[in-house]
Image: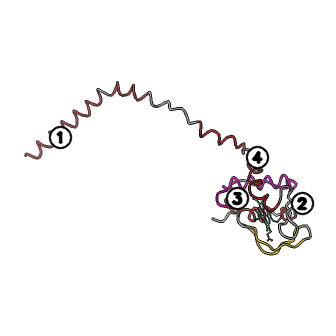
Amino acid sequence: MRQSTLLIAVCIVLVCTALGSCTTDKPKGESDDSYTPQPMSRAEEPGNADKDAAGVDRGQKVFKQYCITCHMANGQGLSGVYPPLAGSEFLDDKQKTISAVANGLSGEIIVKGKKYSNVMPPIPGSYSNADIAAVVNYVMKKFGGEAWTTTEAEIAAIRKK
Ligand code: HEC
């Protein structure tokens, strides 16, 4: 018996506090409204300045940051050490090209009549699939006669995790 009266008392208290908060809600609601229109932080917007919708500018950026060290700005590489991209027949093979960039390449290859047997490391993990798609498209545009293009999804399918 004692327990049930206690329970009823607790219920009454709960209902009262619930009602109490309902009645005081209106003024609270008004003050809550003042927080909601937080302006979207501008810090998030400059990501758009990347202009990578077409993939080209981002691709050029990745090329200059990374590929250029070995393949050179003009895509000529370094004879006998780093194969050329400019006019390379290797670029005719889309799957192999994407895999080389995403996963690295080693072993003997022949590019423009010259043998190479060196190691290209996989692109660092800090580059996203979209970065890889962009740089591959940039390379194809600049050095591969625009024979084909690729997408972020195709990179994801070929890139080893
Ligand atoms: C550390 C040097 C290095 C970097 C950086 C590098 N590569 Fe390579 N790349 C090589 C080497 C070495 C080979 C040849 C590997 C072999 O002998 O099997 C190669 C081969 C290739 C090939 C196939 C052969 C050819 O010339 O067509 C492609 C395509 C290629 N790289 C594209 C890229 C792209 C695009 C980037 C930037 C995302 C890049 N590489 C960054 C060293 C590099």
- Dot label at residue 57: 4
- Residue 17 image position (x, y, % from top left): 24, 34
Q: How many angstroms separate mark 2 from mark 4 (CA)?
A: 22 Å
Residue placed most toward the observer, 11 or 43: 43
Query: Which region of the structure is painted magenta?
Result: 124-149
Q: Please determine whether, in this image, residue 114 is positioned above or below residue 128.
A: below
Q: How many angstroms separate mark 2 from mark 1 (CA)?
A: 83 Å
The residue that mark 2 highlights is 87
Q: Is residue 121 magenta?
A: no
- SS category of the residue bearing label 2: loop
- SS category of the residue bearing label 3: helix
- Dot label at residue 10: 1
Can you tell which quarter of the image residue 16 is in?
top left
Q: How many angstroms separate mark 3 from mark 1 (CA)?
A: 61 Å
- Dot label at residue 155: 3
| Image quadrant containing the C terminus | bottom right
- Judged by depth in the image, the label closer to the viewer, 4 or 3, is 4
